[in-house]
Image (cartoon, rainbow, N blue to C red):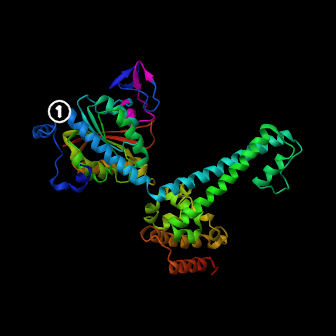
């Protein structure tokens, strides 16, 4: 990752969402992006220029644009039409984003458009986040990484976040993923945990 | 190519993702660059088609209209309140106490003997009020057309608001009655789920006279019955799209019975 004076940045054409520019680089805000928050907390797999990434829950393409700055190709999956309009606009200007409008709970609907990927990044507000991650791990090369941003409140508001996290870890383990690290994204995001996993 | 792709089904048991070196050996694409460009073109066209289909749904426009209507109300009220404060500065002896002045009358009172920007703003609010009324008519008739059963039960406006909270007609048709009952009472519902506080009896359907006019003792029962019937009505509206007189009669009867003090 690129740091300029202690600030996380990425190199690419600016002006995607009014982000600040620091010494010609795009500032990547940890309060807006969970992925940036994870890097600020000093962990997570590095993004490499030859990597192929599957990004689930691409939304408006804010974080996607930063990921695309640092990797080879990003397959960006989003289901809702409104954010998809914005994502298409971002993808038009960044030639290494492949925008896919599909439901991440049904990977077979976009399987024909996909190839093997080095990294799956998931940030979706769904109760079955773990099962979505496991279903999409078919695209992951053996030894590839999964970064799951667990939104514990989307899984169950009435249970305590650590409890939800423990259950998610068990689910991933049972599905053939090795959970290498978990980290809470406080103070940047409340009740969100990043799970960094490797496909066996 | 787009249509052909949509006919092919992939099955999870037999699926392995494409590898670039195998794709390259097929010899269709001169370079990886070519392949990605083609793929992107296909994905854009698929996504654009899906977005277009979504925005052509008749319920999506109605949903936006009712949201504009509700926000318009908020803006009009906010401005009227603020101008009233301004008026009190201009006329220190003025007080609203003991005079039942709805916003519309208030504007008429304030306009008397005033000129300049103040007066122009009042005129503008009045015009916004007229606009609001015609938008409301559009929403109401739109809802009558799109959801005849729901509109017959609770009126076009409340039906359209339910639609807006659910996010569309198919989404509303898939909700159980218990969810429809508390649509629009999100804060109360979550504070109930997270800890202790009593569950909300009603959300948006409170706006229907049969719920808010019901005596407190039976209000929960009335809104529960009405919501259950609305769940059925939404399904009739979505899957059949025509009014069902017999259902409406029975539903009406059921809601009335729920409101009787037993």
The x, y position of residue B239, in whole percent, is 42, 69
Position of A137 with respect to B207 (left or right) is: left
The x, y position of residue A48, in whole percent, is 26, 29
Question: Label 1's element?
Answer: loop
At a point 69% along the width and 53% down the height, the residue shown is B130
> Is residue A39 something that shows in the picture?
yes
Pointer 1 residue? B31
Residue at the left extreme, as displayed: B25
Position of A145 with respect to A166 (left or right) is: left
* Residue numbers of the magenta segment: A21-39
Q: Is residue A106 above or below residue B240?
A: above
At a point 81% along the width and 51% down the height, the residue shown is B108
The x, y position of residue B250, in whole percent, is 53, 81
At label 1, counting other C-alpha atoms closer than 10 Å, the crowd grade (few under 14, some 14-19, many 20 or more) is few
Count of labels in the image: 1
Position of B66 with respect to A28 (left or right) is: right
Whether residue A26 appears in magenta in the rendering, the answer is yes
Q: Identify the image quadrant of the C terminus of chain A.
A: top left
> Callout 1: residue from which chain?
B
Q: Is residue A38 above or below residue B100?
A: above
Position of B115 with respect to A147 (left or right) is: right
At a point 78% along the width and 45% down the height, the residue shown is B84
Asked which quadrant contains residue B174, the reply is bottom left
């Amino acid at each position: 990752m690129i740091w300029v004076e202690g600030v996380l940045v990425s190199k690419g054409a600016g002006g995607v969402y009014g982000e600040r520019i620091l010494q010609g680089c795009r500032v990547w805000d940890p309060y807006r992006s969970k992925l940036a928050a994870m890097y600020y907390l000093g962990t997570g797999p590095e993004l490499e220029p030859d990597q192929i990434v599957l990004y689930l829950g691409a939304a408006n393409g804010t974080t996607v644009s930063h990921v695309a700055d640092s990797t080879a190709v990003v397959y960006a999956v989003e289901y809702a039409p409104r954010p998809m309009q914005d994502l298409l606009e971002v993808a038009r200007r960044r030639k290494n984003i492949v925008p896919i409008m599909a439901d991440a709970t049904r990977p077979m609907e976009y399987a024909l458009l996909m190839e093997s990927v080095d990294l799956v990044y998931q940030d979706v507000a769904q109760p079955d986040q773990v099962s979505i991650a496991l279903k999409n791990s078919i695209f992951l090369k053996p030894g590839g990484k999964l970064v799951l941003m667990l939104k514990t409140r989307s899984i169950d508001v009435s249970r305590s976040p650590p409890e939800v996290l423990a259950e998610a870890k068990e689910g991933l383990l049972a599905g053939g993923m090795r959970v290498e690290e978990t980290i809470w994204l406080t103070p940047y995001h409340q009740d969100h945990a990043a799970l960094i996993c490797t496909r066996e | 190519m787009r249509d052909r792709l949509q006919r092919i089904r992939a099955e999870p048991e037999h699926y392995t993702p494409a590898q670039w070196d195998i794709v390259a050996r097929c010899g269709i694409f001169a370079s990886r660059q070519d392949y990605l460009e083609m793929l992107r073109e296909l994905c854009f066209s698929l996504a654009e088609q899906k977005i277009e289909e979504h925005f052509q749904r008749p319920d999506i426009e109605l949903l936006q209209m009712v949201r504009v209507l509700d926000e318009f109300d908020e803006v009009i009220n906010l401005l009227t309140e603020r101008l009233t404060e301004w008026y009190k500065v201009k006329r220190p002896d003025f007080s609203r106490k003991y005079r039942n002045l709805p916003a519309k009358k208030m504007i008429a009172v304030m306009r008397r003997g005033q000129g300049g920007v103040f007066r122009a703003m009042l005129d503008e609010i009045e015009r916004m009020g007229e606009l609001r009324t015609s938008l409301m008519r559009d929403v109401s008739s739109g809802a009558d057309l799109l959801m005849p059963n729901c509109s017959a039960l609770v009126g076009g406006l409340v039906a359209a608001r339910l639609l807006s909270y659910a996010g569309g007609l198919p989404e509303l048709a898939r909700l159980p009655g218990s969810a429809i009952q508390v649509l629009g009472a999100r804060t109360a519902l979550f504070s109930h789920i997270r800890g202790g506080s009593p569950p909300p009896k009603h959300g948006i359907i409170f706006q229907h006279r049969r719920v808010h006019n019901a005596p407190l003792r039976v209000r929960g029962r009335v809104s529960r019955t009405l919501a259950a019937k609305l769940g059925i009505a939404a399904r009739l509206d979505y899957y059949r799209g025509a009014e069902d007189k017999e259902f409406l009669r029975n539903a009406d009867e059921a809601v009335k019975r729920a409101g009787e003090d037993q």
